[in-house]
Image (spheres, rainbow, N blue to C red):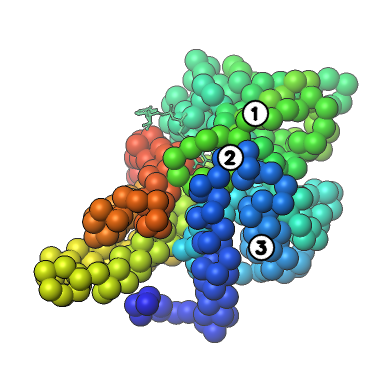
Amino acid sequence: MPYTELNLDLTEEHRLIKREVHDFAVEVLRPASLELDKMSPEDVTRKGSPYWQCMAQAYRNNYHTVLISDEYGGLGLDPLGVHIFWEELSYGSVGFAVSLGCSCFSSFYATLLCDDYLIEKFVLPFVNCKDASVMSCWGITEPAHGSDNLMTGTPFFRDPCACQEVRAVKKRGKWVLNGQKSAWVSNGPIASDAALFVNLDPGMGFAGGGIALVDLNQKGISRGKPLNKMGQRELPQGEIFFDDAVCPDEHMIIDPESYEAITELTLGHANATMGAYFTGVAQAAYDMAMEYSRDRVQGGKPLCQHQMVQSRLFDMFIAIETARAFSRSAMVFNMNTTPPLVQYSIASKVYCTEAAFKVTSEAVQLFGGHGLTKDAPVEKLFRDARAGMIEDGSNDSLSLAAGEMLLREVQ
Ligand SMILES: Cc1cc2nc3c(=O)[nH]c(=O)nc-3n(C[C@H](O)[C@H](O)[C@H](O)COP(=O)(O)OP(=O)(O)OC[C@H]3O[C@@H](n4cnc5c(N)ncnc54)[C@H](O)[C@@H]3O)c2cc1C
């Protein structure tokens, strides 16, 4: 039984979306994610699997258009509504929430640039898709470049000692792409297109990058085996290889002039979303722990009647409420601010993923031995939360980048 949240300033529309997405997450996504958790990554990605059934249902509900305005047929939610949407979806399954979030990547850039051609090409087919066959991904991480891809604002980002290894070279009016993105690309094995972060000018280091919107169903592109990992197993991830693949000139949407700023803006948006995702994960673990502590009897009374259990639940409650209040503020502020103050989004990501890790770990502790078994859903939440501290940038390296941003602001 969820407790009464501090839902200040929610409109009737916010309450409606909260209830609707919560019910979908609990009734559809959570049972499917528990089933997918036990399956091999190949079976998860196979057509007709519970993954595809749930994604198709989410698309039919128009949930894939959460970041698209109603002008183009999207859900048209305000920033607080977007936060509520992601938090509630992740309450049922953070892996599905990440997959749906990544499916928006190309259309996010197309709407950001307000370019009619790109909207026609990337937004409308995505909005009109009802079976999840139009799906994007964020191709940034490479086997040799993880954290360093995201160190915007630091001197290292502009140092020619290192740069993205997926190269785009212009030949006869088209961009030719070569190289490999790592197995960590969410939706990598199944996406129909990618927002691909490439290098255009190695002499500028990472700052010499560009962003290309690339059709992944073309000659010259192949995929690796879906990744077998510890947490968020319902989320398909895998390598993408580029061997003389091509991209029309109009699809190279960002060049070195704005690459660092757009990478930072992307991080600002993605990390704020991570704050919302992991508040949902923490809330789910708390609710399960509370329910279990009321049912399980030890020492002649329910666990929740023992003072130390009450104290543990209260600490979990503080962590969740702080995560929710801060991540809502960070997302609302940064979705309304250009350019965003990315340090707030990073702070939200770091704080909320660590809060989720703490809360899910405490939930496992409260379940006792049962919490370590595959029959207890908190065991999965604990693994899902652990992945969050590395996903979208490891918390350590994001903190280094954010530290530089704090200094930049006062110079
Ligand atoms: C669930 C999940 C989903 C993901 N989804 C995507 C996706 O959709 N698209 C995509 O492209 N990528 C994705 N990633 C990749 C993710 O962004 C990278 O894993 C992350 O940036 C870290 O890179 P890495 O794994 O190569 O670790 P590394 O960069 O090799 O880091 C290893 C360790 O060294 C530390 N470290 C690195 N550099 C420094 C430094 N300068 N100073 C101090 N310590 C340092 C790190 O903090 C970390 O602890 C995902 C990852 C996960 C776990």
Comparing marks 2 and 1, which lies closer to the viewer?
2
257 lies left or right of 71: left
Q: Are marks 1 and 3 in contact (CB under 8 Å)?
A: no
Residue 257 picture quarter: top right
Is 386 drawn above or below residue 200 in the view shown?
Answer: below
- Residue shown at 46% from the left, 63% from the top: 91
Q: Quadrant of the C terminus?
A: top left
Q: Residue at x 31, y 55 (%)?
A: 371
Instruction: Pick the residue in front: 205 or 274.
Output: 274
Q: Nearer the viewer, residue 279 or 118?
A: 279
**Quadrant observed for ligand 1 in the rendered image:** top left
Toward the bottom, the furthest residue is 12
Q: Is residue 321 toward the left or the right of residue 302 in the image?
A: right
Which disc is residue 41 wearing? 2
Q: Amino acid at mark 2?
A: Pro
Q: Is residue 225 above or below residue 407?
A: above
Location of mark 1 (residue)? 224
Which residue carries the number 3 mark? Answer: 58
Where's residue 59, x and y in %?
70, 61
Three-letter code, disc 3: Ala
